[in-house]
Amino acid sequence: MTTVISFLIVLGVLIFIHELGHFAVAKAAGVGVEKFSLGFGPKIISVRRGETEYRISAVPFGGYVKMVGESPDEDVAEEDKKKSFAAKPISIRSLIVAAGSVMNLVLALVLFPLIFMLGIKVPAYFEGPPEVGYVSHGSAAEKAGIRRGDTVEEVNGERVEGWEGIYKATALNAEGPLRLLILREGERTDVVVNPPAGDGYGFYPPMPPVIGGLSKGFPAEKAGLKPGDRIKAVDGQPISHWVELQEVIKSSGRERTFLVERDGRSFEAKITAVWNSEMKSYLVGVMQVEETVIRSYGFFESVGLGVKKAGELVILLFAVIKGLFSGAYSVKTLGGPIMIAQVAGRAAESGAVELMSIIAFLSLQIGIINLFPIPVLDGGHLFFFLIERIKGKPVSEKILGISQQVGMALLIALMVFVTWNDVLRLFR
């Protein structure tokens, strides 16, 4: 029930804000608004105030504002012609159409700073020194001479105070060579980590091998493991890091003996990993527990961090779109309504800040994507207005109708595809 309610709250906020933008600018421009609907299809409830009917409709995946004279060929009563959308200058019509996406962007830019002020969860190791907790065997970091216990002081000449700084530096470096200044037993040394294309650097922060969750039906659950269990050893090999545990599990599908610590007592469990063709590795069905702390910021710092976060997500969005077209990312990673509902449900269970984060993230994506010049989307309407400005007359109703049908077909196909992805993900 939490998942359903959270999903409806998230959708409701996003749709309301978007349609409120269209509505408010239309009213301010003197355009008559006949309907303001959250959802499509048959109405569930409605109320009329003045000329506008406010309604909640049965299909929650969107909404609309019906304005007087939206189409050039629409019959408009003589007394309503001054309030007609089609009769307004292109500049006014463009403002009305763009206002929905702008409101989504504004919502994101308001929520992100608020989230930072209220406090965000960050990994507990962000609060400590940038000490290396584990180095993968055979990795670029091991070949460069990095060892467990080393403290990273600089990355590519820039001083870092914690693992957050290392993550940012490596993300911007895009897996290129890293020049690190390492502190080891009181002595400083320079090392260069140069991973092969597609491989990671291979050094990690402290991550204890403590189970945070279990995949239903997988070997770990069947063997009686529980969240909170700590893996001390596998087949007599001591385990001190989560990545080390992952490497041991992925290496073989034979039966292994896990030494498990629970509530101060140790016991052994026999577990045989299963092969997962999608992940192309052996799995036992354990998920990491991540210790977190709450970090909050002052007003001005939160504004700066919020704007920066929004900018990073915009860059990430276009990087993902580019990756989908280039083949760097699989279309199977795309999610639809079911994934959004699941994420919203988990966020709601974690707290109001997490739910706000989901709303801010989705609002930013909706605001940008809606401005793409694709028929049916706001950007498609703006594109046709641009053509009208250049030609000096509106695009013909025939071309407009065909393009809208094509755009709608593409949108429905995408919705079916991502929903199918969600269904497959549920079964997996």
Image (cartoon, rainbow, N blue to C red):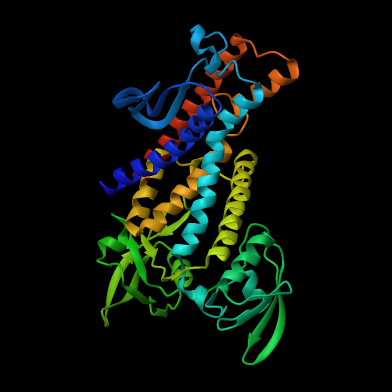
Q: Looking at the picture, tell me which residue is in the foreground, 59 or 333.
A: 59
47 lies above or below 21: above
Q: Looking at the picture, tell me which residue is in the foreground, 61 or 25.
A: 25
Apparent side of residue 64 relative to residue 72 in the rendered image (left or right):
left
Does residue 202 appear anywhere in the picture? no
Does residue 307 appear anywhere in the picture? yes
Query: Which quadrant of the view contains residue 387?
Result: top right
Instruction: From the top left corner, tell me how far across and down residue 279 is, in percent.
Output: 47, 52
14 lies above or below 229: above
Q: Which residue lies furthest to the front in this view?
A: 79
Apparent side of residue 315 relative to residue 291 in the rendered image (left or right):
right
Residue name at image x 55 percent, y 28 percent: 377
Residue name at image x 29 percent, y 55 percent: 216
Q: Looking at the picture, tell me which residue is in the foreground, 249 or 336.
A: 336
Apparent side of residue 367 relative to residue 255 in the rendered image (left or right):
right
Q: Residue furthest bottom?
A: 186
Residue name at image x 50 percent, y 76 percent: 127
Q: How many labels does the image show?
A: 0
Instruction: From the top left corner, tell me how far across and down residue 237 is, in percent.
Output: 42, 79
Instruction: From the top left corner, tell me how far across and down residue 174 is, in percent.
Output: 67, 59
Query: Which quadrant of the view contains residue 236?
Result: bottom left
Q: Looking at the picture, tell me which residue is in the foreground, 305 or 227.
A: 305
Query: Which quadrant of the view contains residue 203?
Result: bottom right
Instruction: From the top left corner, tell me how far across and down residue 352 is, in percent.
Output: 37, 56
257 lies above or below 334: below
